[in-house]
Image: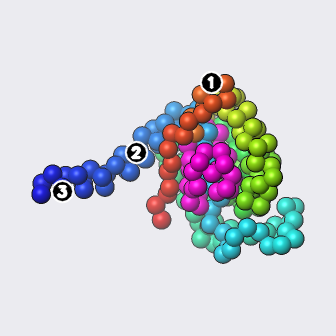
Amino acid sequence: MLRTLLAVVLLACAPAHADEALWALLKQGGQVVLIRHALTDPGVGDPPGFSIDDCRTQRNLSETGRAEARRLGVALRERGIPVERVLSSPWCRCLETARLAFGVEPQRDAMLANLFTHGQHRERQIAQFRALMAAAPAKGNLMLITHGATTLAFTGISPATAEMVIVTPESGGAYRVAGRIALAN
């Protein structure tokens, strides 16, 4: 009985302990962090005929999503996580997530475009991501605001909204997934 209770307690503490190790890794810098955009209005994909240049035609952040993006930014600032650069998918929900979380205008990068609706670019975007890994950040962390399907293609992980997937660059464009951090609601 005591062993069972101890096992339950250890399992309950494991995610929090893993999160602390990942936060410590981020504090050191040199990581690439893929962040899925915050929560959107209900639906999947974008409406037919949407325009990448017109936010009114896209599925955008909900009020809950805006609060989620702000909470992400607060968590990063409270923990003193250094940010070297912020890149974003050109979709409005990603750009807004970046602005609310980091308080900067992100650099738009087609490498982070939505592979859910534009899967034909998958191999090109994966090659660009590998090239980016070869030029790892020197001091801070590189924050990439993107989509769930794009993160899945790059890492094999399908993240929740505003979830961070931490990637450690290795030599020659190789990389390993260090872990993931989801903010508590």
At horizontal 54% and vertical 40% (from top left) the residue drawn is: 177
- Identify residue type, mark 2: Ala
Give the mark nearer the N terminus: 3 vs 2: 3
Q: Which residues are magenta?
A: 141-166
Classify mark 3: helix, strand or loop: helix
- Front label number (2 vs 1): 1
Task: Find residue 117 and report its image quarter.
Answer: bottom right
On the image, numbered disc 3 is attached to which residue? 5
At horizontal 80% and vertical 73% (from top left) the residue drawn is: 47
Whether residue 135 is visible to the viewer of this picture, yes or no, is yes
Classify mark 2: helix, strand or loop: helix
The answer for how far apart the CA atoms under marks 3 and 2 are is 20 Å
At horizontal 38% and vertical 51% (from top left) the residue drawn is: 15
Image quadrant holding the N terminus, namely bottom left
Of all residues shown, which one is farthest toward the bottom? 42
Q: Position of residue 76 (x, y in %)?
A: 54, 48
Give the mark nearer the N terminus: 2 vs 1: 2
Front-lying residue, 129 or 94: 129
The answer to the question of whether label 3 and label 1 lie on touching residues, with beta carbons closer than 8 A, is no
